[in-house]
Image (cartoon, helix red, strand yellow):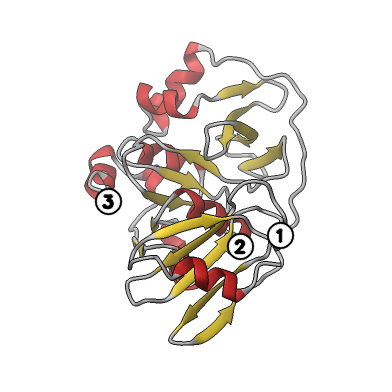
Amino acid sequence: MTTTSDILMEASSLEAGERTRINCLSCGGSGKTLTISRMDDGTIVWNCYKASCEERGANGGGRLVRTRETPRVQTTKPYLKDLLRLEDEQCEFLLNEIGWTEEHLEFARPLWAPEDQRYALPIYGPMGIRRGYVLRSYSGDAFTKALTYMDVSEPHMSWYRTDHGSNEVVVVEDIPSAVRVAKYCNSVALCGTGCGPDYANEIAAHAQVVTWALDADATSLAVKLHRKHSLLFRGSRVQPLECDVKDMNEADVAALFEGERV
């Protein structure tokens, strides 16, 4: 097991704002999966971003705080029915009805599920590898708007890393919102509102600064996530919204997120 003394020894050479990675002995995972950061106030924060590992905590002012939680159990449920390339009329619907452009279509690369009459939106991991689909219906009589299918046992988050020179990411609830934000900066969709330790660890492994921009009716939840996970990041803030990003006009999305680069 990784000990506190191991962590503090590794952290002793870090300046404020710096981060390093070491092998995590708690889970024995391959690669340097344990990140150690020294915050601006001197607090040492660490977490293993392997989804199945619970190792995370902080040490500030001589007081040790371990924040180990049981990560949510991930399950696989691949979508096994036919998926087709979009016809022109289906592309036109996305362009005219939900505010997407050709650039958004390129980010999302949606398909069509003819048997379910839904758009199949790929769920991408942080390295751009597809790990599942969200099947989204825009029919008013659909009982459930979005259905999630996972090919692998990983967090149900979809990443759009369009600015590789930035270490910031904007966290939103759903793929349509994340695709809108991706035109201006890196984004990730939670594909829901949950953000447990495995989700937060994955975000922290790929970004140092996070903006929580959940839907307009979930600002209080965004504040809770900010407070719960802020020690994992060099910077964390909440962006209150008057309406959901997916429902904004392009000028408003640009005004909020065009300068999101650190």
User: Tag 2, which secondary structure?
Assistant: helix
- Residue type at tag 1: Arg
Q: CA distance from mark 3 to mark 2?
A: 24 Å
- Badge number at residue 131: none
Residue 16, image x, y percentages: 33, 68
Q: Residue at x 61, y 29 (%)?
A: 120
Residue 229 appears in the figure: no
- Residue type at tag 2: Pro
Horizontally, residue 80 falls left or right of residue 203, namely right
As displayed, is residue 13 above or below residue 118?
A: below
Horizontally, residue 214 falls left or right of residue 67, namely left
Q: Residue at x 63, y 15 (%)?
A: 84
User: Tag 3, which secondary structure?
Assistant: loop
Marks 1 and 2: in contact by CB < 8 Å? no
As displayed, is residue 63 above or below residue 238?
A: below
Q: Residues within 10 Å of mark 2 (few under 14, many from 20)?
A: many
Residue 101, image x, y percentages: 35, 26
- Residue type at tag 3: Val
Q: Residue at x 41, y 30 (%)?
A: 97
User: Tag 1, which secondary structure?
Assistant: loop
Q: Residues within 10 Å of mark 1 (few under 14, many from 20)?
A: some
Residue that numbered label 1 is attached to = 72
First in sequence, mark 3 or 2: give its number: 2
Residue 93, image x, y percentages: 45, 24
Q: CA distance from mark 1 to mark 3?
A: 31 Å
